[in-house]
Structure formats: structure tokens, C-alpha cells
Image (cartoon, helix red, strand yellow):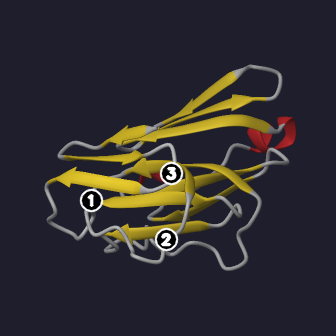
Amino acid sequence: MVSVASDFIVVIRSDGVVHAWGANDYGQLNVPDDLGPVKQISAGDGFVLAVREDGTVRGWGRNDKNQLAIPTGLTDVVCVSAGSGFAYALRSDGSLACWGTNSAGALLIPEDVQQKGVKAVSCAGNKIAFVASDTSVTTMN
């Protein structure tokens, strides 16, 4: 798996080890030694989020907007998506968690999205897209 930000790249090898290269202005290339095997990764604006094999999330790099303030007790995560100062995590039951800056309402999950359950979420810059369990798509910002 690979995730590309504006000035750096992170990849997961087949054995779950993460590598990163490019700009390192905020320590986003400094992959934690104790990260362990990773199953999914997302590069944001100067920060990285990783879903570990146990379904927990770990982050590193830029944290000026609390983008690394991963909610306590967040587990059962299947994927994360990092935006510009905020992030989303999708749990296996289709529920979402989000954190970071609420600039332009980035953390306001539409009620109909939560009610339908989510199959996928993707962030880029200040944009967010949700794919609901009924395959409808909702975008924000």
C-alpha cells in the first residue's frame, strides 16, 4: 500500500513494515521503531496515520491542529484517512471517529451518513468523501 502527500510518500511493505521518504519538515518520515506491523496507512499535511494489525491507530509528524489527538480507546479500525489538520477513522461496524481541527466544519459528520453506515472515507486537503453502505456518496467542503 502507498499513500502520497504533497511532499512525502509512505508505503507499507508486504510484511507490514512502513517506510517513508521526501520532505521531513514535521517529523513525518520518522516512523516509530515500536510501530509494529501495519495494515493501512494515510499521509496527511505533514503527518501520518497508521492502522496497526490489532485495529488501533498510531500517528506521527505534525500536530499543530491536534491531528495526532487520536481518541482514547479507538479500536476495531479498518482504515484511516488524513486531511489537512484533521483525520477520520472507519471502524468495522461502519461507524466513524474524527479528530483534529474543525476548520470549515471538517469534523461535522452528516447525520444521514452516520445512519446509513459507512463503507469508505477519504480525505484530501479540506475535502471529505463518504461512501455509505447503500453505495451513495456524500462529499463535504
107 or 82: nearer the eye?
A: 82
Pointer 1: what residue?
Answer: 46
Looking at the image, residue 119 sits to the left or right of residue 63; the answer is: right
Q: Which of marks 1 and 3 is in front?
A: 1
Of circles 2 and 3, the one toward us is 2
Q: From this viewpoint, is residue 12 visible?
A: yes
Residue at 34% across, 67% down? 31
Residue 108 x/y as whole percent: 61, 53
Q: Earlier in the sequence, mark 2 or mark 1?
A: 2
Q: Nearer the viewer, residue 46 or 31?
A: 31
Relative horizontal placement of residue 72, taking residue 38 as reference (left or right)? right
How far across and down, in percent of the image, does residue 42 sit? 44, 48
Q: Label 2 sits on what residue type?
A: Leu
Disc on the earlier residue, 2 or 3? 2
Return the residue found at the far front. Answer: 15
Q: Residues within 10 Å of mark 1 (few under 14, many from 20)?
A: many
**Kind of residue at badge 3:** Ala
How many C-alpha atoms fall within 10 Å of the one at disc 2: few (<14), some, or many (≥20)? Answer: some
Amino acid identity at mark 1: Gly
Under circle 2, the secondary element is loop
Residue bearing the label numbered 2? 35
Labelled pair 2, 3 in contact (Cβ < 8 Å): no
Q: Position of residue 33 (x, y in %)?
A: 39, 76
Does residue 87 lie above or below 125 as drawn?
Answer: below
Give the spatial CA distance, label 2 vs label 1. 18 Å
